[in-house]
Image: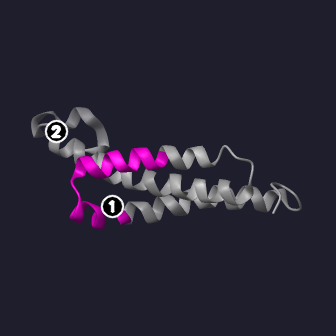
Amino acid sequence: MQLGSENPELVDTLISSAGIIGLMIGSFAAKPWLDKFSLRSVIRLSLFLSTAAAGMTLFLKFYLILIGRFLFGFFSGVLAVTSAMFLNTVVPVSKARLFGPST
């Protein structure tokens, strides 16, 4: 499929939805990864892989953009869960109010 060839609205919808679906699935996938690996390892791996996924979207191929957006959303979902957990382990309870809803 050529990018934006026949139905540009469908292409836009699929690309946007891929990131949101990846975000939802990734937030649930964080728990099994945290059972196997340390919190720091999961954060580092997710940061590295989300950067690689963002790099995939630089190529103007529809399927690469779609997969890249999904993977970026997936690893962003993992990071949303793990970064909140990291803040809970680092920030003292007495200072937790200063750090917003993530803690």
User: Where does residue 13 sit, x and y in percent of width and height?
Assistant: 71, 59
User: Where does residue 101 sit, x and y in percent of width and height?
Assistant: 30, 44
Prevailing SS of the magenta stretch: helix
**Dot 2, how many residues are within 10 Å of its Cα: few (below 14), some (14-19), or many (20+)?**
few
Confirm or deny contact between disc 2 and disc 1 (CB under 8 A).
no
Q: Quadrant of the N terminus?
A: bottom right
| Mark 2 vs mark 1: in front | 1
User: Where does residue 70 sit, x and y in percent of width and height?
Assistant: 56, 59
Q: Which mark is residue 92?
A: none
Give amino acid for label 1: Ala
Q: Quadrant of the C terminus?
A: top left
Asked whether 41 falls inside the magenta stretch, the response is yes
Q: Which residue is mark 1?
A: 30
Q: Residue furthest right?
A: 6
Q: How is the image coloured?
A: one colour
Q: Secondary structure at mark 1?
A: helix
Q: Which residue is mark 2?
A: 90
Tell me which label, 2 or 1, sits earlier in the chain.
1
Q: Is residue 55 above or below residue 74?
A: above
Q: Secondary structure at mark 2?
A: helix
Q: Quadrant of residue 5?
A: bottom right
Residue stretch in magenta: 29-50
The count of marks equals 2
> Which residue is rendered at x = 27% and y = 49% of the image?
41
Give amino acid for label 2: Val
**Along the line of sight, the residue nearer the viewer: 9 or 68:** 68
User: Where does residue 22 sit, x and y in percent of width and height?
Assistant: 51, 61
**Along the line of sight, the residue nearer the viewer: 3 or 22:** 3
* Position of residue 13 in the picture relative to residue 72 (left or right): right
